[in-house]
Image (spheres, rainbow, N blue to C red):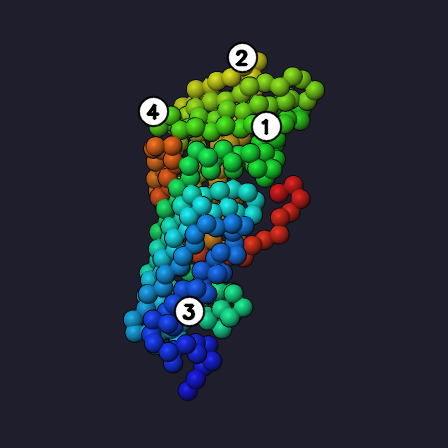
Amino acid sequence: MTTGLLPELSLPNQTAVDWVSRGVGAAIRALFKHSEKLEARVRVEPVTKLLQGRIDSFELLGQHLQMYNGLRLTTLELFSNSVAIDFSQIWQGRVRLQQPVEATMRVVLTEADLAASFNTPFVLGKLAQVQAEGQPLSFQNVQVHITPEQRLQLQAEVQQGAKNTLAVGFSSRIEVLERRRIRFEEPVFEGDTNGLPLSRALVDHLNGLLDLDRLALQGTQLRVDQVRLQQQRMIFYGSATIQRFPTRQPQRAGA
């Protein structure tokens, strides 16, 4: 009996698997504004398991990705075993999971990615929420570097109310708490002497902001086991639990 879900099963087995890989890849690609390379690879044996939506393993490799809020990633890698998908909507570029997916994750950001991300309106708006004497702040020209001592260095120009622009900044170690909170530890403050309170407030604000439960796409949970700083790159190793396949949400004003 024909289900109508996978007509390619009448073709060579690899054709059906390739079709599913392309469909899943297209759905994931729609989550990003730009991707230089994004390839999904599905493995299943025997191929008839696809009729029940069963997949033995799934791999995703993305390179030079840009999200719709402007955040950038150089590399995104995901790997999962035993995925169950409802293929009835894959024709419309939608993926519906029959059960939650547990995947291992590796994400690489370069200094250029970090600097570009910090200078997006999305992040600059978050930085402007730093509490400092009750006056509005305006951040600009944010620079990010990874030092040979494996510390992250952040420098920026800040205008506080009608005052002159101040140079603020710090370098710090990066740690992960509870597998979900990225924190700047042991900061060494830099910049103008008058901007030292702002630098301290910036670290406190970022430590409260970088909670993966607040940043993850709807239906997903991200956890980080290790962060490495090396050769002008920040590398995250961790896992993703996907309860339902995420969709791109409209950007809300002020979000």
Q: Residue at x 38, y 50 (%)?
A: 77
Q: Amino acid at mark 2?
A: Thr
Residue 19 badge: 3
Q: Amino acid at mark 1?
A: Gln
Could you say whether the residue bearing mark 1 is in a helix, strand or loop?
Answer: strand
Question: Are discs 4 and 3 less than 8 Å apart at CB?
Answer: no
Q: Mark 2 — residue?
A: 193
Gap between marks 2 and 4 measured at Cα? 24 Å
Looking at the picture, does residue 94 appear above or below residue 227? below
Question: Tag 2 or tag 3, which sits nearer the N-term?
Answer: 3
Looking at the picture, does residue 122 appear above or below residue 241? above
Gap between marks 4 and 3 measured at Cα? 47 Å
Gap between marks 1 and 2 measured at Cα? 18 Å
Q: Residue at x 34, y 33 (%)?
A: 230
Question: Tag 3 or tag 4, which sits nearer the N-term?
Answer: 3
Could you say whether the residue bearing mark 3 is in a helix, strand or loop?
Answer: helix
Question: Are discs 4 and 1 less than 8 Å apart at CB?
Answer: no
Q: Position of residue 201 (x, y in %)?
A: 54, 24
Q: Position of residue 127 (x, y in %)?
A: 58, 31
Could you say whether the residue bearing mark 4 is in a helix, strand or loop?
Answer: loop
Q: Mark 1 — residue?
A: 140
Gap between marks 3 and 2 measured at Cα? 60 Å
Q: Position of residue 9 (x, y in %)?
A: 38, 78
Looking at the picture, does residue 73 appear above or below residue 83? above
